[in-house]
Amino acid sequence: MTLENISLTYRVTPVLRDINWQIQPGEQWAIVGRNSAGKSSLANIIAGSAKHYVGRCTIDNHARTRGLAYVCFEQQRTLIERDKKLDDSEFRPDAADPGTTVRNAISGGQQLSNDSLEWIERLGIAHILDRGIRFVSTGEARKTLLAQAICQTPGLLILDTPTDGLDKRSQQTMKEALSFLLGKPDPAILLYRDIKNLPEGITHLLVLDEGNILTQGPKQEVLARADVQAVFAHAKYQLVGLPIDTQRQDYSRDDALILNNVSVRYGDTTILNDVNWHMGKQQHTLLAGPNGSGKTTLLSLITGDNPKAYGQDITVFGVKRGSGESVWDIKRCFGVVDSASHLNFPPRQKTLHVVISGFYDSQGLYQKPTDGQVRQAKAWMQSFGVADLIETEFDTLSFGQQRIILLARAMVKQPKMLILDEPTLGLDAVHTHQLLNAIDHVANAGHTQLIFVSHSVGEYPKCINQCLEFVSHDSGYQLVCRDLAPGELP
């Protein structure tokens, strides 16, 4: 594969400039760069999904004949949007359309081959084969799309941050799978936001910085360069004062959450079994557990998005679930950042409108906001360092930029509870550090409590003082809750 003088401009903004790059047989490359460096844009050009660029991209006959496969979060978003359009739940006796199952996503509707079955076992997704891909965890969907791509036996495989959204055990499984792939003669291109934890099978690096090639070459030579290390070093971030209304009187004096013997079952499958959880007034909780253990289901019971919450002993800020409150009464208490809402956000929305939509708990803005709401949304964007993106369309931003925009969206109404499901997903180290500092600042103001879901050790705010963990138990998972002393690690 050869790229010659590749440049790409979106509207008037240069995204890539004069990219010249060649992959020789036997080389395995990683493209590395921080958020908005141009990694995804370059991958889209190679994969053929970006057309309006200047320069020449030449794919060798072997790769062109067997095809290219590109695994990324946008691929998951496209599949979910397709399934939503084809959803026929209202016409089914069970009122549930699974959409594309994991099995069909991998096999294309055909019988699974022996190679497919081997990869399904290697990636640990045999137990979800008959679930709809819309209804599996982010990490499980990630592994499904990788299995799908590998089973197509492409001539060139492109993987965007393949360990994102995976728990610790699944990350190790993925690393072993990558080692196997990178040891084969077929080329692969991996995209990473950092230079830490690159797979050993990677032989060469292409480093992008703001759309330009900083350097390229053998991995160890590139990593030894001071300018490369400087790009990925933690920048000092001056936290701008957050626009928190400290005079508001509607903050709850009740304990945040009380769950007694809560269970959720779908058919013969038990997701949650006799969950007991008490979250007090000043507590900020880290929710941990493997992919598919039930974290998302638990959160959906709290926020009112899961009808199985009714008839159960759940009290939220002093109000017992099912006592006459509306869904909107419940949602008013929460600001949420999660992969489901991220992947389901409609296209062609201005970024400012996405933030303002947080006042209405809507996926997009469909009514005229007040002047006060516009000012508040701009203030939060300013605080998080994304004020320059106000007029930009949300779906043109990098995944990491979108994540920060969604945090601003969650905070505009200054909720009693901020629920962050893997909020650092898609963020480079610098933006992760910035985001965690901002979350701590929000928590320390004393008006918003926090539930923080994370798989990554060390990537959680300092304010955490309670740990709620799903641990393996018999045939499922048991929820263990413990309060933390000041300075105690989860």
Image: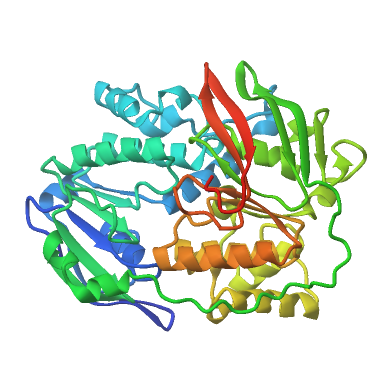
State the residue at coordinates (17%, 46%).
65
**In the rendered view, would you say 114 is above or below 318?**
above
- Can the viewer see residue 343? yes
**In the rendered view, would you say 35 is above or below 134?**
below
Q: Quadrant of the N terminus?
A: bottom left
Toward the viewer: 266 or 459?
459
Displayed quadrant of residue 263: top right
State the residue at coordinates (56%, 32%).
470
Q: Quadrant of the C terminus?
A: top right
Q: Is residue 144 left or right of residue 25?
A: right
Displayed quadrant of residue 449: bottom right
Which residue is the extreme one toward the right?
A: 324
Residue 320 location, x and y as percent? Answer: 87, 38
Toward the viewer: 8 or 38?
38
State the residue at coordinates (89%, 44%).
325
Residue 354 location, x and y as percent? Answer: 64, 66
User: Which coloring applies here?
Assistant: rainbow
- Can the viewer see residue 51? no
**In the rendered view, would you say 223 is above or below 199?**
below
Residue 429 location, x and y as percent? Answer: 40, 63
Which residue is the extreme one toward the bottom?
A: 12
Residue 171 location, x and y as percent? Answer: 36, 41
Q: Is residue 461 left or right of residue 433?
A: right
